[in-house]
Image (spheres, grey):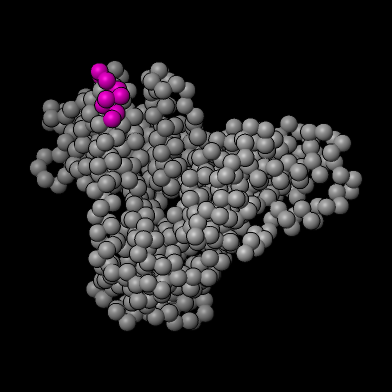
Amino acid sequence: ESWRRVAWGVKASAAAASREVDVLVLGGGPVGSEVAITCAMLGKRVAVAEPRGLLLAAPTGWVSKALRQLGRDHGAPDGSVRVDWAMAEEYLSRTAKRALKLTANRFSDAALLAGDGYHAPEVIKGTARFTGAHTALVDSGEGQPHALQFANAFIAVGSASFRLDCLPWDDPAASGWLFDGDTIKDIGRVPQSLVVQGGGTIATEYAFIMRALGAKVTLVMREQKVMEGCRMDGSVQDAVMARMRRIGIEIRPESGDFSEVRPGPEGSVVLASTGEVLECDALLSATGRVGLVDAVDIPAAGCAAPARGGAAVDGATMRCIGQNTDHIYAVGDCTSEGSLVNPQGLLSTGLAESIIATHDAFPEEMEARVGQLATYVSECPVAVWVEPTVSYVGVTTEDAQAAYGDDGFGSVKVFYLETIKGCVERSEPYGRDEFLKLVYRVSDGPDNGRILGVHVYGSGASEFIHNAGTLVNQQATVWEVCRTVPPAVTVQDILKMCCVRAAIDISARGKGPRPAQGIAGDKQAEVRNKIFNRNRPRATD
């Protein structure tokens, strides 16, 4: 093949020791593992270069998920119960073992399903770097590097916490006081008073987690609302911030910069915007993440130089931008621009990108094995593990308003407590602020009634969103849900309830399936809006 002819052009000493593989995967995290298992099931010979020397099909965020569960099991949302950190070490250890076992089971099952022709991926401990368009070296720092020749390469090296230069990361006094999203697992204690810097998903998650474990928490951020830039509906952002304040988390919006930082057991930070002094025995700076592509030298393979640690890609295929790079892909949170899967940086979007990439690399084999796969270039379901969970897919209210104007869309909320099960299921009812919100199209055209977006804030929200994602990506209408989904005594019945109310609204606005259903003058529009977009459900006790 042509790639072999190119590869043999490297130095003779390297060529003599090199091995050929069909696929080289750079990174053995959850996205890299997904690529490896998919390619192996297609009969490809796969090598995975991973610094840890093992595959782990669990996201970087598994640490926060384990600590969140610890707070649920032994802490209290309002910080009224203080949890011993020794229990956190136990939870983290157990979770890591389960994740490794899950990974091993997945590859074992893949071998059984694939049958003859399956080659178990070879994991090479070390960091890979490209030396040519079809060659790479994997260096563990011990002994001779491994030289590899490959037909296709998938870059899935992940990301690391972004560190602000203005913070004293190298100051000995900051050891045990200053942490980022990767090192917070090593804190070794539940702090008395924690300042969390940042307003993104990681900062918001840890604010809830540390409060539940018993810490006093202050969240400082440059933004007005938490999780801006995540394509989250404004009503959900408002609900999250209201819950934070109710459980005692202090929030300082538009105040994310410090004029002074004083590390130590009795440390403090000074807000640049107001001069307020916040005393804290720990500071978590969670201001984003940066890709780790710089270390793999993608320009040596003909790819464009990375930006902010990420590789530029063609979003339709996940191929790296560059010269003769049709065989090199980048997936997950190590991409910089070009991906059409949104929002970026989450495991769900990274897994969707891996499907796009492997389907593009091996279209005939993929379709022969599993049939035509979706490309996921439209809308990907997202879950954010705050307390309670947030999940969403599709267009926000703000997006719809900008795209269609006030008359071109509608939205409706139904609260968990408005369902029969939500009202009577538990001794402790669901929170009065937990809801599902539906955004839908209103028009004179064929897209009338189309479900544009679904946004959930509440217990188990992550379990709601895949079905909603199917409806959004199939461009289903509210009438299709009304016709085909029977009512049921489940909390998820809120999706059906939202669609029924949306159908009522559309018909009342004169846009229903039957023109005669329009209400002259739509005198009830204001009443419907109040009912459909309440901030709280009606009391039931």
Q: Which residues are magenta?
A: 109-117
- Residue 462 image position (x, y, % from top left): 48, 47
- Residue 410 image position (x, y, % from top left): 71, 47
Residue 267's place in the image compared with 227, above or below, is: below
| Residue 268 shows in the view | yes
Q: Is residue 114 left or right of residue 475?
A: left
Q: Which of the 4 quarters of the picture holds residue 83?
A: bottom left
| The one of 495 and 342 positioned closer to us in this rendering | 495
Residue 184's place in the image compared with 466, above or below, is: below
| The one of 281 and 531 positioned closer to us in this rendering | 531
Q: Is residue 524 left or right of residue 188?
A: right
Question: Which residue sits at x=65%, y=45%?
Answer: 497
| The one of 121 and 258 positioned closer to us in this rendering | 121
Question: Which residue sits at x=59%, y=36%?
Answer: 471
| The one of 525 and 15 positioned closer to us in this rendering | 525
- Residue 131 image position (x, y, % from top left): 25, 36
| Residue 200 shows in the view | no
Q: Which of the 4 quarters of the picture holds residue 65?
A: bottom left
Question: Which residue sits at x=75%, y=50%?
Answer: 406
Magenta-colored stretch includes residue 376: no
Q: Is residue 369 left or right of residue 18?
A: right
Quadrant where the C terminus sits is bottom right
Q: Which of the 4 quarters of the picture holds residue 109?
A: top left
Instruction: Report the predominant secondary structure element of the magenta stretch.
Output: helix
